[in-house]
Amino acid sequence: GGGGIGSTGGTGGTGGSKRYCYYVCLRAKKHGHHCCPYPSLAAYEIESFVVDEIKAIGSDSQLCDQVLKEAQERLAEQSPRAELDRESAVSALREFGSLWDAMSPKDQRELVQLLVERVAYGATGGQVTITFRPTGIRALSEQCFEREEEVAI
């Protein structure tokens, strides 16, 4: 079985001058590191994987359709009248890579927090599952629209 990935932490390097960020398995955090084959994962590696997966959604129409369908369903659960502008969402997902590259690290971190609700890592199969916030894709669409307006001015 897999475990959710929990909080980040840091540890000193050999001279105490380096800081390493990592994600800790929730099972390992609750029951001890011996309960999880991979009690922690390097933050950079998992974050890069998540960003690459988000970039891939915009270039794969089937995956994009699936993600948007799930986002609309989850959005409707939260608010029955909530609508996801499909055209804007598709455009935003296609433009994610260029938007990402133009952002500061702080803005990148905020964008991922806006989009991603949960990342789960199945240690036995090495599978990573990303759960998006239902409002995140809509917020990404709005952010892309605002960026287009700024460029046009």
Image (cartoon, grey):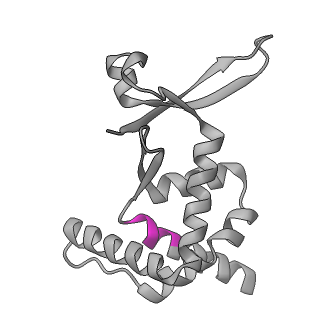
User: In the image, what residue occupies the spot 33% across and 21% down?
Assistant: 30
Q: Is residue 79 above or below residue 23?
A: below
Residue 36 falls in image quadrant = top left
Q: Is residue 4 magenta?
A: no
Q: Residue furthest top?
A: 15
Relative to residue 71, is residue 151 drawn left or right? right
Q: Nearer the viewer, residue 110 or 131?
A: 131
User: In the image, what residue occupies the spot 22% across and 65% down?
Assistant: 78
* Whether residue 153 is visible: no
User: In the image, what residue occupies the spot 35% across and 65% down?
Assistant: 134
Q: Is residue 90 above or below residue 5?
A: below
Q: Residue furthest front?
A: 125
**Image location of residue 125, percent across then percent down:** 43, 44
Residue 101 falls in image quadrant = bottom right
Q: Quadrant of the N terminus?
A: top left
Q: Which residues are magenta?
A: 135-140
Q: Quadrant of the C terminus?
A: bottom right
- Is the magenta region chiefly helix, strand or loop? helix
Q: Nearer the viewer, residue 19 or 40?
A: 40
User: In the image, what residue occupies the spot 20% across and 68% down?
Assistant: 77
**Image location of residue 52, percent across then percent down:** 62, 60
* Whether residue 66 is visible: yes
Residue 80 falls in image quadrant = bottom left
Q: Nearer the viewer, residue 109 or 131?
A: 131
**Image location of residue 18, percent across then percent down:** 76, 22
Q: Nearer the viewer, residue 63 or 106?
A: 63
**Image location of residue 15, percent across then percent down:** 80, 10
> How many numbered callouts?
0
